[in-house]
Amino acid sequence: MTIPLPLTGALPVWVDLLALLLIAIAAGLLGSLVGVGGGIILVPVLVLVFGVEIHLAIAASLVAVIANSCGAASTFVEEGLTDLRTGMFLETATAVGGLAGAVVAVTFLASHGNVLALAFVPVVLLSLFLLLRQPNTGTDDTAPRDWLSQRLRLEGEYVSRATGGPAHYHVSRAGVGLGLAGISGFFSGLVGVGGGNINVPAMNGTMNVPFRPAAATSTFMIGVTASAGALVFLFAGDLQLFLAAPIAVGGVVGSYAGSIFQDRATAGRLRSILLCVLVFAAVVMAARGLGYLG
Amino acid sequence: MTGGVAVPRRFEERNVPRALQGLVSRVLRSGVLLAGALLTGGIVWEASVGQGSLLTASAPATGSGLVGLLHVGGPAALVLIGVLVLAVTPIARVAISVALFGAARDRTFTVITLFVLVVLGATIVVGVLR
């Protein structure tokens, strides 16, 4: 007797859709509670659990990433936590990078799923590293201002949780940040993630943007990055409509639920769950890339 | 400017056009809600009438194919409209930024946002015409 697998046509359509919806809700919930985007969980799950070809998983994930970004960013922008100038400046690089990454994925790597699986591994490892590291929550008023960030007046103000009052910061090393944003965009388009795992440390660690505005600004930028990538996959014919729809809706529902329950959650335990998921994803994607699995 | 930077008065007004925050936030929220409703409608519709494998409805790769699917209608067309609304939402907020920075005579940021708009617009034009 064989067990009927989802997405093979062996099960009723509603069962497949429900399974995708539920897995995306779980990914969105876990992601928003722990602070990573949905893509980094969704792509490996679609590939490893549902047996979806990796380039189809990447295309669908990018659509879900847009939905997640726009939903969350609308709130952050309204609250004034998003640094619009810095975000729009860095978007020039993430948009071009996202476009380039997606073009490479659909033209050169469409028939080389193993390379895409391998490309996923450093992205997961970087997220792991960042989860284990303490973010830089303060700002450095003495950080050197470079020519570019002065010229563009890249500076921001937000309500600090530590003092409860407005805190001001100025951007440093804008050129380096722009380069890192380009790399982030490239990996976003290549493997179907948002790129927050590079954007946030680029802004927080390199550009002197405090952690909360950096995270809110990254969320804001990701919509544009993922849109550039998703359009390339769409016009390459790689976008499966009924794969994208449930994971986009489920992802938004899950991360919205996560934002409500955030204060009550036991963040430490969730973090360990996510660490296990990411380690598992990295190992299995590496194994698949090297030809040991399917 | 030397050393530490003093907090400027009325920082937000100096930093970005006054209406930008509210408009961007509203466009993003409306786009997600509209797309979410379309996609949910498509999912429910497909769940009630769909048969066989889900992985046979890929979005058409050409402009004429997209228009064709919209003419045919059905749950796939509804989902396609939802996906297009979602993809266009960030582009719409970039377009609004171009207009507001332009109106505020912030030439540098008009050019920066216009560059992003052109990159995204070119992706669509090349994709549709290909």
Image (cartoon, coloured by chain):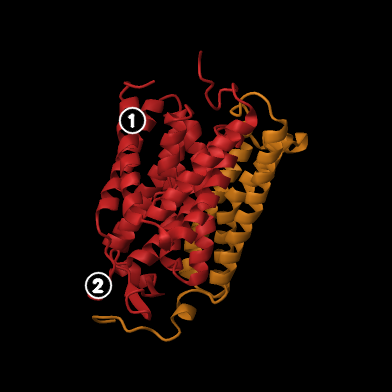
Chain colours: A red, B orange
Q: Residues within 10 Å of mark 2 (few under 14, many from 20)?
A: some
Separation of marks 2 and 1 at Cα, in angstroms: 40 Å
Above or below for B93 versus B103: above
Q: Report if the CB atoms under discs 2 and 1 are less than 8 Å apart.
A: no
Q: Is residue A289 visible?
A: yes
SS label for mark 2: loop
* Residue drawn 40% across the image and 43% down it: A40
Task: Provide the residue designation for mark 1.
Answer: A284
Frontmost residue, A180 versus A277: A277
Q: What residue is disc 2 on?
A: A140
**Residue A271 shown left or right of residue B94 in the figure:** left
Mark with earlier residue (2, 1): 2
Location of the C terminus of chain A by quadrant is: top left
Query: x, y (%) of residue A260?
Result: 49, 60
Q: Secondary structure at mark 1?
A: helix
In which chain is the residue bearing label 1?
A
Residue at image location 25% in from the left, 76% down from the top: A141
Kind of residue at disc 2: Asp
Give the residue at the far top of this rendering: A1
Determine the image quadrant of residue A113. Answer: top left
Amino acid type, label 1: Val
Residue A232: x and y, percent?
A: 52, 39
- Subunit under mark 2: A
Q: Position of residue B34 (x, y in %)?
A: 66, 54
